[in-house]
Image: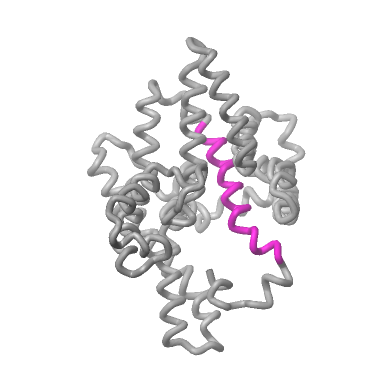
Amino acid sequence: MGAERGYWNSLFPRFPVLSELGVYAVCVFFCISGFLILQTLPKNKTIGKFALNRVKRIYPVFFILNLIFFAVGPFVNYEWIGKLKHQPVALLGHFLSNSLFLPGIFKLPIAQKNAWSLSYESAFYILAAVCFFAYPRHKWITWLGLLLSAFTIYMHPNAAFFLIGIFWCYEYKNPRLKPFMAGPVGLIAYGVGIWAFSIQPLFALVPVLVMFGTIATEQGWLSRFLQMPVWQFLGAVSYSLYLIHPFVLDPIRRILTKYGSPSVDAAVFLLLGPAVAILVSYLSYIYIEKKLTDRLFPRAGRTTPTSSANA
């Protein structure tokens, strides 16, 4: 976002790999989803219970932000939403499509640009749940779900990173693999993965498989580094941080452009932006993800910010 405002103009041409870092990070998160969701499915007795738990986790923060986009966007001329100020039916249609996470998997206008990954997540939840709950009574549905999954990966290759998490969901306790995950292996694989992803995303599958393996098996330097309390805390608030940071960073860079000094804008943005984004995300985590969700769904159990599994 700083580069779009003109900060660090010379940095990205010199290191084009940086432009892919955000998408690479999201693909690594797909590994986390593949790993955790396959463990979560057996704990839900029905597909309805699983779906309700996913709604509880995703919707409170997302829906509030989505509502803000479509309520305020037409009046501040926010990109394509600003053009729909006098088209209420079209505006409502796009609000519903965004609320259902259709943009991303489908080529539809998206309001929250970073929410494209939630479209992938939702598709994975649906396909994983259908395959799991249909088996073994309706195996043909499971096979149909697997074929549809293969087609989805063919159309959207980045979805292949879910498979890495699924693999380690079954193999993370394998004692024969753990020795290969020790030491600096995870850090090396992380760097190789970034470089490979910048060439062709699918080239990064093997290094990310290794890198995520060190985390899943809790081996090596990278795993120990991520177990530090600061990263556990950021892991807990990460969902709010992922969705809310554009709401924080964009106003900050607009203010800096209008009132700041060109010589210090980049430094102020770099220091102030993440700090404010983390603070607002923590408040969202406490008051929306926990308190509001518990009020909307009173029986839902909540985890604490220090939970390793939640992070």
User: Percent position (x, y) of residue 233?
Assistant: 46, 55
Q: How is the image coloured?
A: one colour
Q: Quadrant of residue 168?
A: top right
Q: Nearer the viewer, residue 103 or 61?
A: 103
Q: Provide the major secondary structure of the magenta segment.
A: helix
Q: Which residues are magenta?
A: 16-37
The residue at the point 39 percent across, 66 percent down is 78
Where 129 falls versus 92 (above or below)? above
Spot occupied by residue 15 in the image (x, y as percentages of width and height): 72, 68
Q: Is residue 271 above or below residue 104?
A: below
Q: Above or below — where is 148 with respect to 100?
A: above
Residue 170, percent across and down? 62, 27
* 67 in the magenta segment: no
Q: Image quarter for residue 35?
A: top right
Q: Is any atom of residue 4 visible in this view?
A: yes
User: Left or right: 4 with respect to 187?
Assistant: left
Seen at 64% across and 77% down, the residue is 9
- 106 or 215, which is in the foreground? 106
Q: Is residue 139 above or below residue 173?
A: above
186 or 57, nearer to the observer:
57
Instruction: Point out residue 128 in the picture as x, y percentages from the top left corner.
Output: 51, 28
Residue 182 seen in render: no
Residue 24 counted in the magenta span: yes
